[in-house]
Amino acid sequence: MQYDVSTKILIAKCGREIIHRLIGIRLTDDDVLEELPQETVSLKRADAVIMVTDKTGNRRIVLIEIQTAWDRDVPLRLLDYRTRYRLKYGLEAISSVLLLQPSGQAVAQYEDNEVSFRFRLIRVYDLDAQDIVQEGLICLMPFVPLMRHGKDLVGQADDLIYESSLPRKDKADMLGAMAIFSSLVSRDIPRMLFSKRRDIMIDSPAYEVFKEVVYEDVWKDLTEKYQLEGLTEDEKKIRLAMLLLQSRNDVIKILKFRFETLPPAIVQAINELWHPDILDKLLISAVTAPSLEQFTHEMDEELARRAQLK
């Protein structure tokens, strides 16, 4: 799954914030977090097992399962993980599931004729993005697109990450994770984020994964629009590259012809656009806009409009 990269990044960099703010386990600055090895083949890479040690030396294990969509076997798998780590370490275990997409089937317990097991179920989509943005919780910004009011606040969350004091590499990871998660709720938000922050996102391991996510969506659009059903993925990739290159060049040529001097920043912004429909509209703007400033305004408006679409 393409979301494995994002979840591993967030657990590695933001385990403390996730445990405290989302799972609801109070941590102090003295608490030490140590990610335990995932030793069993049954554990997926997206899971996290963290040992928390407080200042008195007391230890407990926090298991975190991040699910993009609900699966009825999640509780039983979580019980399996908990049992294995309880047996190995003999410590109190706190089990939790972060559910990213809405589901009417999600439950916070498992029962059969012998076992009753309760765990913490955090429905990320029920959380309010306004609270995260207002508090400036940088580590939780990647989840904003999935939350209530999230689509309206993606731009603010993006700016908060980009303008934060985080090292460049951490910013890249946060932005890349947010772009990938946003693909669960929108086809245009991730493209907007990628076009806007490509210069820094390329420093993240999520970059290559994200490009695949974007290409998959664009291929679907192109397959329908240009009747490419009979082409292989490689043929689609070549056709996509040709279409995008031609469309970008057309927009740039018209702008240079009309306004002569074209700032490098505008050329770069156009060359980072991924969707033919956006470029088609910008081609019209390049012909009709009375000034370069108006063209730039219309380009920003189009990207913002698409970011609000499902």
Image (spheres, helix red, strand yellow):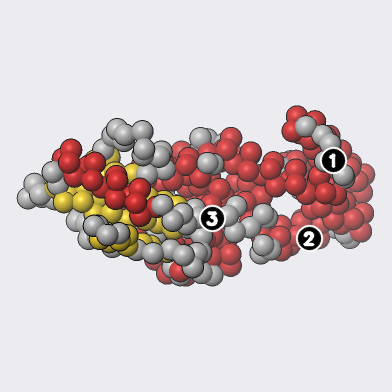
Give whichever of 167, 62 is nearer the camera: 62
Residue bearing mark 3: 158
At x 8%, y 46%, the residue is: 57
The amino acid marked with disc number 3 is: Asp
Q: Earlier in the sequence, mark 3 or mark 1?
A: 3
| Residue 90 horizontal/vertical position (percent) | 13, 43
| Secondary structure of the residue carrying numbered label 2 | helix
Q: Which label number is shown at residue 228?
A: 1
At x 79%, y 53%, the residue is: 278
Mark 2 Cα shell of 10 Å, populated few (<14), some (14-19), many (≥20) = some
Q: Earlier in the sequence, mark 3 or mark 2?
A: 3
Residue 6 position (above or below residue 156): above
| Residue 222 horizontal/vertical position (percent) | 81, 45
| Secondary structure of the residue carrying numbered label 1 | loop
Q: Is residue 196 visible?
A: no
State the image quarter where residue 213 is shown: top right
